[in-house]
Amino acid sequence: MNCPLCGGVHLSLFGRDRRRSYWRCRACELVSVPPDQRPDPAEERAEYDRHENHPDDPGYRRFLGRLFEPLAERCPPPARGLDFGCGPGPALAAMGRERGYEMSLYDPLYADEASVLAADYDFITATEVVEHLHDPGRTLECLLRRLRPGGWLGLMTQLVINAERFATWRYKDDPTHVAFFSRQTLEWLARRHGLGFEAVARDAFLFRRPE
């Protein structure tokens, strides 16, 4: 098993439960689930279809605002954005359009339009997405290539703290969560790609491509 983020081969067992094992990369510190223990597309779709994230839900909008509001301060309209992994209820895209942004959508299950991934953007958001990625290294590199100089990548995901807390962490119990980032992993990602990095909330992070 290679690390799905950096390709590293030095992984050590980080934890195990009755369903899966979890391995941490010594290079980038991503914690990941082995390929043969990840869900297939049908299982993923069945899990996602149970989520109820409506674009007009005030609570959901407040949740997304932890990323969207700091991003809007740094990248004001007019600007072009991509809501990557938007799901069936693209609330962040709706929030962006209401503020004057030109928004595009992409989701491999709900908005699979390949041409969207060939365009360039001033910002890209991926809210509660990276923990689902089976190949986060390739996906994030693809997104970063689509950012214009000075563009922003915004991620929302909960972070690994340590092995003791991971053992009882409910976030890992979602069967579609297969890649778990820590603060160290995000900092590695920034160094790897020469990006600016800041945490704007405990689960919201901004990366900036150099001008």
Image (cartoon, grey):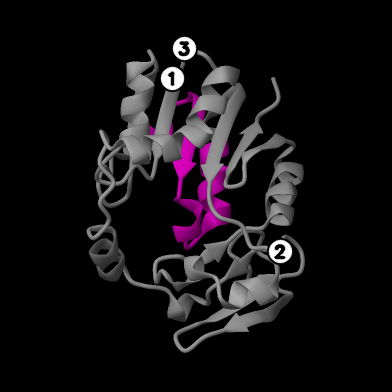
Q: Bin the neighbour count of mark 3 within 10 Å (Cα to Cα): few under 14, some 14-19, many 20 and up.
A: some
Amino acid type at circle 1 is: Arg
Q: Which residue is mark 2?
A: 29
Q: Is residue 210 above or below residue 139?
A: above
Residue 192 horizontal/vertical position (percent): 74, 46
| Residue at the extreme bottom | 18
Question: Would residue 41 be found to the left or right of residue 26 on screen?
Answer: left
**What is the spatial separation of the Cα atoms under label 1 and label 2, in whole angstroms?**
32 Å
Q: Secondary structure at mark 1?
A: strand
Amino acid type at circle 2 is: Glu
Residue 1 visible to an observer of this rendering: no
| Residue at the extreme top | 78
Amino acid type at circle 3 is: Pro
Q: Secondary structure at mark 2?
A: loop
Q: Which residue is mark 3?
A: 77
**What is the spatial separation of the Cα atoms under label 1 and label 3, in whole angstroms?**
8 Å
Q: Quadrant of residue 145?
A: top right
Residue 189 horizontal/vertical position (percent): 69, 48
Q: Which mark is residue 197?
A: none
Q: Residue at x 52, y 35 (%)?
A: 67
Question: Would residue 199 be found to the left or right of residue 62 on screen?
Answer: right
Q: Quadrant of the N terminus?
A: bottom right
Q: Which residue is mark 1?
A: 80
